[in-house]
Amino acid sequence: MAEIKRRKTESFEAFMRRVKKRWQQSGKILQVKKVQYFTGRPSKTRRKKSALHRLAMSEKITYLKKIGRLPEELGSRRR
């Protein structure tokens, strides 16, 4: 993309409007937004570890419910 220079009699606000308009037309803003919020998939080992942790925690909660150490409403509540 070519350089955008400020004109002699142009105010800063007008210059910024012109720059933003040029960025919008070129698609740079859309591209930046896509990259900014992109989250890649976690690795296979990380997914497995997370699944094993969830499984262990659910087993622990059901065990505590069975022996009466955990109230029913606490175990079923989620974040």
Image (cartoon, rainbow, N blue to C red):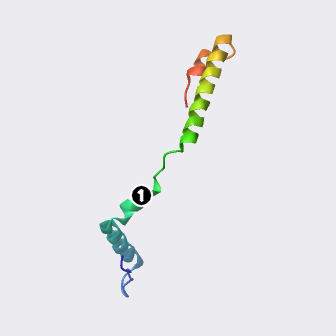
Q: Nearer the viewer, residue 57 or 49?
A: 49
Q: Residue furthest top?
A: 67
Residue at x-position 57% and y-position 40% = 45
The residue most toward the bottom is 8
Q: Is residue 70 left or right of residue 19?
A: right
Give the percent coordinates (x, y) of residue 14. 36, 76
Mark 1 crowd level (few <14, some 14–19, many ≥20, 10 Å Cα): few
Q: Is residue 69 left or right of residue 14?
A: right
* Residue at the far left in the pictured view: 25
Image quarter where the C terminus lies is top right
Secondary structure of residue under mark 1: helix
Identified at 61% across, 17% down, the residue is 62
To which quarter of the image does residue 20 belong?
A: bottom left
Residue toward you, 12 or 66: 66
Instruction: Give the amino acid type for the residue marked by disc 1 in the picture.
Output: Lys
Instruction: Tell me the quarter of the image containing the N terminus.
Output: bottom left
Coordinates of residue 5 in the picture (x, y in percent)? 39, 83
Residue occupied by mark 1: 33
Where is residue 18 shown, x and y percent of the image?
Answer: 34, 74
Q: Residue 49: horizontal and vertical position, in percent?
A: 60, 36
Query: Is 64 drawn above or below residue 18 in the view shown?
Result: above
Quadrant housing residue 70: top right
Up the image or down, 18 lies above or below 10; here it is: above
Asked whether 40 or 37 is in front, the reply is 40
55 to 1, vertically: above or below: above
Q: Which residue is rendered at x = 64% and y = 15% of the image? A: 65
* Position above or below: 11 against 55: below
Residue situated in front as seen by the camera: 53 or 34? 53
Numbered disc total: 1
Quadrant in the rendering for residue 35? bottom left
At a point 59% along the width and 26% down the height, the residue shown is 55
